[in-house]
Image (spheres, rainbow, N blue to C red):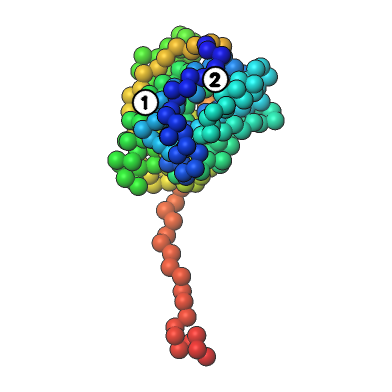
Amino acid sequence: MPDSHPASDVSPALTSDLAGAPPRLAVVVPVRNEAGNIEGLVAEIARACAGLAPFEVIYVDDGSTDGTPAALEAARAGRPWLRVLRHARGGGQSAAVRSGVAAARAPVVATLDGDGQNDPAFLPALVAALEQGGPGIGLAQGQRTGRKDGPFKMLQSRIANGVRGRILKDSTRDTGCGLKVFRREVYRALPYFDALHRFMPALVAREGFGVVHRDVVDRPRHTGTSNYGLFDRLWVGLLDLAGVWWLIRRKRPTPSVTEVVARREEASC
């Protein structure tokens, strides 16, 4: 891993534009103890998003205890589009995503995991899928192919996705994929709870928006180990699944509303 970032991340002119213009896209990256993966992934995101400018990248450090804060500080040098938020203590992946979305200034938000397994090169295709679908599409969800996880993690994910799909009928093969692109206002309308990120397709559909899917190629982790929820992917996730099922069952259409205004002759009295 290089000690300093390449000057060719984005062109000088583009860097100037990114610093001043309102962003079109915000890329939110939750991280915890990922010091060895920061620089390479930041550079990849910049290259992938060069055609989506102006953009901003928001790293949310979820209470890291390794060299992640220092790595993020080093990565910020010369990158005015890179923002860093820090949780005082670990709150979990969904909490980190929520903090990033709340801070985002763009109407469209992308997320990807901070371990490098999600390839940022797929971001433009996901953004295009969302925008081409029109305002009725709330989420473009990546679905991993050629997964590089270990057999135990793969088994857990296969069982969890199978059970979730049968109960929620969300037509999504892989809700655990961190590569997502969505409209910020749609996300803000979702009920927040821990593990929200794993149930976004069903909850976006609950709000009346469509979901599109695109295959993305998984990559092996470059360095480090997983820091988010291996055990609860199956067992604690069943409790979340029951809660989401209840939310969907309790959803009722909101009637159209009009404001009653006084007639002109009444207003003049």
**Pointer 2 residue:** 38
Disc number at residue 31? none
In the shown orientation, is residue 108 left or right of residue 33? left
Percent x, y of residue 165: 39, 29
Estimate how packed mark 1 is, as few (under 14), some (14 to 19) or many (20 or more) residues with alpha carbons within 10 Å.
some
Estimate how packed mark 2 is, as few (under 14), some (14 to 19) or many (20 or more) residues with alpha carbons within 10 Å.
many
Residue found farthest to the top: 151
**Dot 1 amino acid type:** Phe
Q: Is residue 8 visible?
A: yes
Residue found farthest to the front: 12
Give the secondary structure at mark 2.
helix
**Pointer 1 residue:** 122
Percent x, y of residue 182: 42, 38
In front here: 51 or 227? 51
The residue shown at (47%, 9%) is: 150
The residue shown at (66%, 17%) is: 66
Of mark 2 and mark 1, the one earlier in the sequence is: 2
In front here: 84 or 128? 84
Q: In which quadrant of the rendered view does residue 70 lie? A: top right
The residue shown at (56%, 14%) is: 3
Percent x, y of residue 145: 35, 18
In the shown orientation, is residue 11 left or right of residue 60? left
